[in-house]
Amino acid sequence: MDQTVINILNGLSSGLLLFMLSSGLTLIFSMMGVLNFAHAGFYMLGAYVGYATSRIVGFWPALAVAPLVVGFLGAVFERACLRRVHRYGNVAELLVTFGLSYLILEVVQVIWGRAPVAFDPPALLAQPAFTLVQSAAAGLSIVFGRADAATCAHAVCSMFPATRAFMMLVALLMLLALWLLLKHTRVGLVIQAALTHPEMAEALGHNVPRVFMLVFGAGCALAGLAGVIGGTTFVTEPAMAGAVGSILFVVVVVGGTGSLVGAFVGSLLIGLLQTVPLTVDKSLVDAASAVGWTVSPDSVAYPLMKLTLAQVAPILPYLLLVLVLIVRPRGLFGTRDD
Amino acid sequence: MTDASFHFRPINIGRWVVWGGYALVLLVAPSIFSSSLSQTLLSQMGIAIIACLAYNILLGQGGMLSFGHAVYSGLGGFLAIHALNKVGDGSLHLPVSLVPMVGGLAGLFFAALFGFVTTRKSGTTFAMITLGIGELVYSMSLMLPEFFGGEGGVTSNRVVPPATLGITFGPQIQVYYLIALYCFVCTGLMFAFTRTPLGRMLNAVRDNPERVAFIGYDTQRVRWFAFMISGLFAGVAGGLAAINFELATAEVVGAQRSGAYLLFTFLGGSTAFFGPIIGGVLMVLATVVLSELTKAWLLYLGLAFMLMVMYAPAGVAGLVLANLRLAAFGKLKPLLSGYLALLVAGAIAFTGASAMVEMLYHLQLNEALGPVMKFGGVSLDAKGAPAWIGAALLFVVGAVAFEVARRRFRVQWDAAQHDIERELKRREAA
């Protein structure tokens, strides 16, 4: 029971991290029609810039500086490259970001090397946020921070790391801020107007290309913020972009392209799907024997059936993608069926 | 463009010359480049050409940007290598020369299966879904070592006695000619495909899907059929690769390979039919030769790709065609001096930039070898200021000169294009 709670929380926190990425991707996509292939690259850049700045000024300032730096780089890229290929259409825009993803990877490897760097969370986040204590005598209880050794000596203690709790907190704050910005400020109104009626917004005197540049920069900054937090929670290494990149697209398609709500639900769904099955060490063979069938190594498709759920966990998001496309091609919250 | 009326020409001399020349190049290439390294390279080029042409059915002719096309060449390769093993132990009676067809059928099958899902969407969503399918298959390949051979992959032996007509496929040159034959036939078939009604509908679906739907065609189905044909040829390329390397690892279905197809098809030029042929040659040169020469090759490749997308979206083939058009109107000669200036300035800037990049990579990767490194015959001290200042100076001078040359060239180029447009209008009126 206690371990299940921790697993679900882990899944939710991974999902919220994915949302920090997919929200920026969705914002950029629904606004400019550009699928930013280098989004995961900006995420990685955020982690590395955060690592570099945190060694100089400490973690907390770095948490603010790194997204700004990444956002600035994103805006520069939009201004210098993306705007230039805009007239060639969506495919060219996608291709130029595809080229950028190669470039970011190489530049990161040149500056920070090919091995993982030690990007540790600050002391405040390096401890458990809370500990679930499951003891035979007292039942289930929660201890904030680390439970003392005496308690854990005759009870099962499951800890939930503070970095993950912080990740959830930041993602939720970001969701709130984004919602307030888009729905309740003048800037948000202009963005929404430029989103649906770019010509009319331009005719009313708003500089739509600049709005695009700022939105692209903001989307990249969100990815950078996610990078700083993801970098401390997981490993900061050159492979981190590739690990999250393709999952990100699954989130966006499953949620429905261009829908922020879809991105939110899709992120949580994929986050849970990626983490929870990892703890289930059962296969189809076990399922078959539970209902009374016997499966031996000679049976048809035995190599497939002997795979445990934990082993197939990495492909579950992609299977979900295929399933969603067959049942509901527009995605869970998509509105356009193109 | 050709004019709309149809001219009956039973013998198209231009076409005979082009295809004859292509066959001749394939035929004599190994005699000109006869070292064993170049034979290996040529074999790989033949395979890459088929793969890139197959990819371009999607990208260039169908406007479908696939990030997972290695799935079809790769699965074709795996099926082919299992077939080759079965031929080897005598349980399957099939000449080795037909094993690539097994790969092709596998590619067709999987393209029909996965394509049914992926082609439900077009545009950017299609791109995302193909990426997802690619990841799915790649992850599966690591999960099922029984079929995919795990980390080491599946090995085979292409020499299966008895030899037919003395051909054992032992020596590389025999494999090369098998690949060259497949390459020629596949190129011809894929060109023929562009002339079929389906090929034309595919162009229409790329350009204006809404209108095609109004006429009464099912755009999804057109995309799906094209996807299957592309998968078939990709599978043939995979099967040939299986025979050539006698090995198939999980890498052949991976995202890296899919990315390479996209990158080099685009670099070669996706708007012209022959573009991917250039792309395939570039692919082998870059992944085999350039990666040997420099550790920074992916950086150069990414930069070249981005510049190409921004400034020459029709790829190398587009550049060739634009200059052929100039030559046809007699406008090329005045531009030659401009080209020369661009070339020299660009070379200077590139030398400076690449010297700096190489020093950076050297400092990071070859720390143990000391700071002195070779760069194009010159010894550079990567930790000393003179080398850096020299390289930076070279780069700045080259870049400034390039920009000046580019502005002048731009004026000349625009004037020439303007003249051509006017000439075309005049001819139309006449």
Image: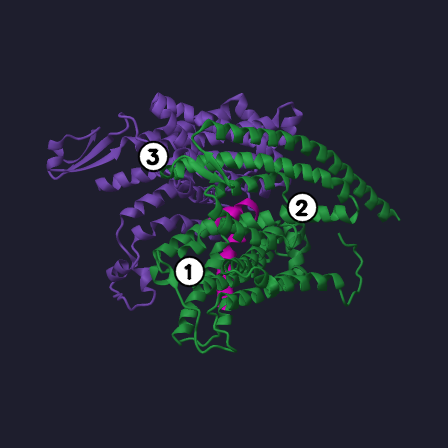
Q: Colour of chain A?
A: purple
Which residue corresponds to mark 1? B248
Which residue is rendered at x = 54% and y = 44% of the image? B124
Task: Return the x and y of residue B154 as percentages of the image width and height.
Answer: 38, 62
Which residue corresponds to mark 2? B319
Q: Report the magenta residues as a range.
A: B102-131
Kind of residue indicated by mark 1: Ala
Is B112 colored magenta in this rendering?
yes
Q: Please check whether the numbered discs 1 and 3 fall on a single chain.
A: no
Q: Subunit of mark 2?
A: B
**Residue A57: in sight, yes or no?**
yes
Kind of residue indicated by mark 3: Val
Regarding mark 1 in the picture, which secondary structure is present there?
Answer: strand
In the picture, which quadrant includes the N terminus of chain A?
top left
Which residue is rendered at x = 40% and y = 72% of the image? B86
Q: Please check whether the numbered discs 2 and 3 fall on a single chain.
A: no
Mark toward the start of the polypeptide (1 vs 2): 1
Regarding mark 3 in the picture, which secondary structure is present there?
Answer: loop
In terms of depth relative to the viewer, which is nearer, A127 or B427?
B427
